[in-house]
Amino acid sequence: MSNKNKKSRQKLNVQFRQEIVSFFAENPSGGYNYKQIAAFLEVTDKALRKLIFELLLNLKEEGILRETERGKFKFNGAQLIIEGKVDVAKRGVGYIISDQLEEDLMVPVKYMSHIIHGDVVRAEVVKSRGRLNAQGRIVEVLNRAERRFVGTIDIQKKYAFLIPDDPKITVDIFIPNGKTRKAENGDKVIGRISDWPEDAKNPFGEIVEVLGATDSNEVQMKAILAGQGINFSFPDEVLEEANKINVELDVDEIGRRRDFRSILTFTIDPVDAKDFDDALSVEFLENGLTRVGVHIADVAHYVKPGTALDKEAIDRGNSVYLVDRVIPMLPEHLSNGVCSLRPNEEKFTFSAVFELTKEGQVKNEWFGKTVINSDRRFTYEEAQEIIETGKGEYAEEILCIDGIAKKLRAERLALGGLEIESAEVRFELDENGLPIGVYKKISKDSNKLIEEYMLLANKSVGKFVGDRKRKMVIPLIYRVHDKPDREKVEQFRVFVSKFGRDFKFKNDHDIALQMNELFGEMREDANFNMIQQMAIKSMAKAIYDTENIGHYGLGFEYYAHFTSPIRRYADLMVHRILFETLEGKQKRHPHLSDIANHISITERRAVEAERASKKYFQAQYLQDKIGERFTGFITGITDWGMYVEMHENHCEGMVTLKSMRGDRFVFDEKEYAVIGQRTGESYTVGDPVEVVLSRVSLVKKQIDLELID
């Protein structure tokens, strides 16, 4: 049979199967033979009628149908067709992640033929006889033709293979000679699959872009971005549209705004920041209150719905921050120029203005369009020095708002907000962009000052638009964070008990309060950061949603992202909806829920890209240190090894179980420990260890360690 005929038969198989299952699901009480099904499908061809009979027998074998009498079949129970993304686990088993199911659907190896990790598929939920849990059977791949695969090309004499970077993609892509785009052996490339014949072990494909030599940081960063489907350049149409926007402010528009240009205003940002999307203004009022303005770049004034700029921004969803570069959501002319709140430049802003007591009570709030002129740009370090010494430019104003911020923070934590202070790994790069140092950035008072006013603005905007007391419900994109899963919290309780700590709680609200108490007790403990990281793992992930369930981690009933529209599309949408609300011109946003779901996905892919870039730079920093010894502690355990963070450089590597000498070590999930089968020697998270650096792979972004006895 030719490949063309095979493809045609396979397509008919899928089509007929879906229609047959749908027919029986819609007619669950009746019994039907293959002739009646063929009549329903309007099939008269003898060979196709035989195919229908074979499909009925297959469905019976899988438990979807049952044979009530010879040749007559009846539906065997509820059948669900779902769509989702495939996650390939070890040993080739697949799991389908779908919004239609509460839990991931397991797909046995026998149904994983010609399926690749990351494929979006349509699958049947099948309950096989003798099994308690349902399984999935993939019936169709939906988007493989659109996917791009990043990897290294291996050139042979008459053909080539694309070896994917993603370790979960276990099949190489066959590339015919004329489809290599003149890539050289070992180049990093982007390819696509053009065909996968039923009888072929490997899919056939072509190279769509050659990135270059793998030893280049530029190429590696582009490969990381491409692997997550993130564009590292803007289309010409978008750049042209952005470049037409004038930096000079329109005089008539200034007249329509509240004018803060004469009010003391400043920004506080990292020393290497390029875009400044938030500023604070401070006024001391005669009634003893302090008026603090949270001024946010008015991106919505320049980026209009339906434009090329808007379409590109929503597609990207957010900016991406790699170790050595930023991939902005908006072109630099906007992100670093027109919209950036640089000092001594007049800028349009959208503001949340609060009149506050020294105790942090909000006596008045106002939202609206404004114009500002920032007087000063502070780095976090400069502001911190003023807070610590009480001296410096605008010291009175900074000390005042810092005092109020501390009150706001104390109240937030007392009401159930989580106090997470995890340190962030940063790199010191030389003039060539190579890592020469690794350090942890600790959040100080100046960071917390800005954080509290941003939280206040976000919370207040969310409540203003979403308050249930309103007669009309106004749709909005909220930042939501669900209550923690009790099973994961129980795992956390067991974990901290290994450090001699007793973690008890009465209800969901009490979990956060008890965690804060634990953090306070362990702040000076060497395991503090790890305890906080494990606490985070016990929590749900924050996402964007139009259904407001509140933000558990912050302890807020209403919370919406308002303060970073230069780098997050969620904030841009919140700006638009807030302005419409203030103007009383409520517009329809029919796809708001889809947007919320999309930007939750783009946020996750940005996090993955950022994590991959850190892994790469850690490997690069350590590549000339093979054979050196380090002290560290165990940060995580899996069934194949232990993750160890080294004290000297804050880099994390893996000690594989098979590399551990002196015994056969296995992962005991119940004890959450690696245990020697003969000696009983055990290792668990938090244990101090000494390791030697045995291998570094830049391509795999992998650091291999071995334990020293």
Image (tube, helix red, strand yellow):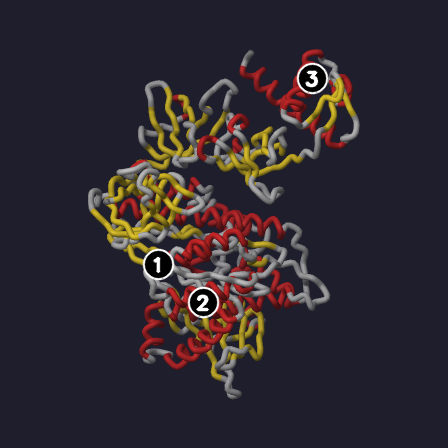
Q: Which residue is mark 3?
A: 53
Seen in the image, is 593 located left or right of residue 197?
right
The local crowd at label 3, few if under 14, some if 14 to 19, many if 20 or more residues have their Cα within 10 Å, is some
Above/below status of 410 relative to 707: below
Disc 1 and disc 3: Cα gap in Å? 64 Å
- Going by the numbered disc 3, the residue's amino acid type is Phe
Among the two numbered marks 1 and 3 on one chain, the one whose residue lies closer to the N terminus: 3
- Going by the numbered disc 2, the residue's amino acid type is Glu
Q: Which residue is mark 2?
A: 517
Whether tag 2 and tag 1 are in contact, CB under 8 A, the answer is no
Disc 2 and disc 1: Cα gap in Å? 15 Å
Above/below status of 40 relative to 228: above
Above/below status of 705 relative to 535: above
The local crowd at label 1, few if under 14, some if 14 to 19, many if 20 or more residues have their Cα within 10 Å, is some
Residue 540 x/y as whole percent? 52, 53
Q: Nearer the viewer, mark 2 or mark 3?
A: 2
- Going by the numbered disc 1, the residue's amino acid type is Asn
Residue 98 x/y as whole percent? 58, 41
Q: Which residue is mark 1?
A: 527
User: Which residue is painted at 67% across and 61% down in the image?
Assistant: 474
Among the two numbered marks 2 and 1 on one chain, the one whose residue lies closer to the N terminus: 2
Residue 221 occupies which quadrant of the picture? top left
Residue 683 x/y as whole percent? 34, 47
Where, quadrant-wise, is the N terminus in this rendering?
A: top right
